[in-house]
Image (cartoon, rainbow, N blue to C red):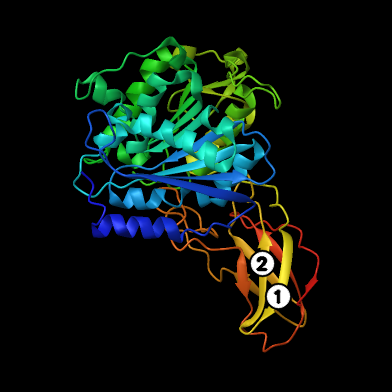
Amino acid sequence: MMNLRSPFTQALILLILAVPMATAQGTFHEVTYEPSEKPGELRYGVTYTVWIPDGVKTLRGVIVHQHGCGSGACKGGATASADLHWQALAAKWDCALLGPSYHQEDKQDCRLWCDPRNGSDKKFRQALGDLAVMSKHPELETAPWCLWGHSGGGFWASLMQTMHPERIVAIWFRSGTAFSTWEKGEIPKPEIPTAAYGIPMMMNPGGKEKDDKRFAGAWTGSMAMFTAYRAKGAPVAFAADPKTSHECGDSRYLAIPFFDACLAMRLPKPGNASQQLLPVDQKLGWLAPILGDKAEPAAKFTGKPEEANWLPNEAVAKAWAEYVKTGATTDTTPPPTPTDLKVTMTPDGPMLTWKAAADFESGLQGFLIEREGADAIAYPAKPVGRFGRPLFQTMSYHDTPEKPVPELKFTDKTSNGIKRGYRITAINSVGLKSKPTDWVEAK
């Protein structure tokens, strides 16, 4: 049972509460559940934080960013819904962005949550219902899901697709699936319904995991699931990341376009009262050899389709071909211009606040703050990329913003009390700049 008074649990709760609730144009809602010792219920505490874009009348889906096993992964999951880049995807499709954070301490059994049959499925669905009431979006309880899972999160997602295939738009497995585990008899083997073979999925192990003693199972398990599901005609692909081992690296630059294409293909039209997902038309996809780096339209593919990668459209196929060679993707378009810039005089100097949407293709590296009559300022001064490209929100091992999550706020402490005009330019992760905002005078 989770000790709610343990240093780890208290630190996790403080971390969750410390996440800024105004990182972009949206609102946050959060529920926390205590652990239970009742049979069939979740043994660990868990917090679910959801971000909902401003102005959305009816949510069309939920993008779930599920962390892996261990205390570090759990803490990483606490900031998932504050991610500006994933928020951009959610906002485009009128979706919520949900970040679960289990209160699992190191050396505790991860499968007590990452096998959803041990209570996390029920708690996840309970959370959607409670958050639906809290957010006044009743459709949140029944909306379809995109599932992104890293390591143990992929394990969880692979079992969820056997339990709720009708609810799942698509799945991204980053270095994790339960497939080999259930095939070996280490956990009860689920019954796989026919509908599960209609879900678009991407297996995304790190290329360096293949020969790694600790993480080789992520590679072999992903390959085994791809082979088995593709043989059944499932729309599945395999995208090995050549730059990484078990960390997430720059996988988001392919994961987000993949989900974007699947949401476009499967969501009912806005205003449609039905939330039934549309079937995948595989004839419109692109195919590529399993470990190749070239894709072509399905109608032109001369190999065996049942052994080939299935990719949802030309844009994803081109991004996939680049990603499997370089571990990232390029971007040739500038980011959106920041909005709603305000400048207020404070005792510490002019304080700037603004809103910004992440560049859909390549996220946000930072901002250039221009000042009338003074040098421009780079914010942050030096973006950090410990795992993947340097970004405004430094990415963790788990593909979540590292704490402290930066706010869209800057105080010019070198102004010496001078009132001047300011404007801001956004910079994406490949260095392209947006058009600047209009000049705004300090008040």
- Is residue 438 shown above or below 357? below
Q: Is residue 304 visible?
A: no
Give neighbour class at mark 1: few <14, some 14-19, many 20+ (Cα, 10 Å).
some
Quarter that holds the C terminus: bottom right
Name the quadrant containing residue 259: top right
Name the quadrant containing residue 14: bottom left
Name the quadrant containing residue 295: top right
Q: Is residue 198 visible?
A: yes
Q: Determine whether the residue tagged by mark 1 lies in a helix, strand or loop.
A: strand
**Nearer-the-camera pick, 148 or 27:** 27
Q: Position of residue 270 (x, y in %)?
A: 70, 27
* Circle 2/circle 1 CB separation < 8 Å: yes
- Is residue 289 shown above or below 406? above
Q: Position of residue 302 (x, y in %)?
A: 54, 13
- Left or right side of 222 for 262: right
Q: In the rendering, which numbered label is found on residue 234?
A: none
Marks 2 and 1, how far apart in space? 9 Å
Q: Residue furthest bottom?
A: 416
Q: Amino acid at mark 1?
A: Thr
First-in-chain label (2 vs 1): 1
Quarter that holds the N terminus: top left
Q: Determine whether the residue tagged by mark 2 lies in a helix, strand or loop.
A: strand
Residue at 53% across, 36% down: 132
Give neighbour class at mark 2: few <14, some 14-19, many 20+ (Cα, 10 Å).
some
Q: Position of residue 245 (x, y in %)?
A: 34, 44
Q: Position of residue 49 (x, y in %)?
A: 47, 46
Q: Amino acid at mark 2?
A: Thr
- Left or right side of 45 for 311: right
Residue picked out by circle 2: 353
Residue at 37% across, 47% down: 247
Residue picked out by circle 1: 344
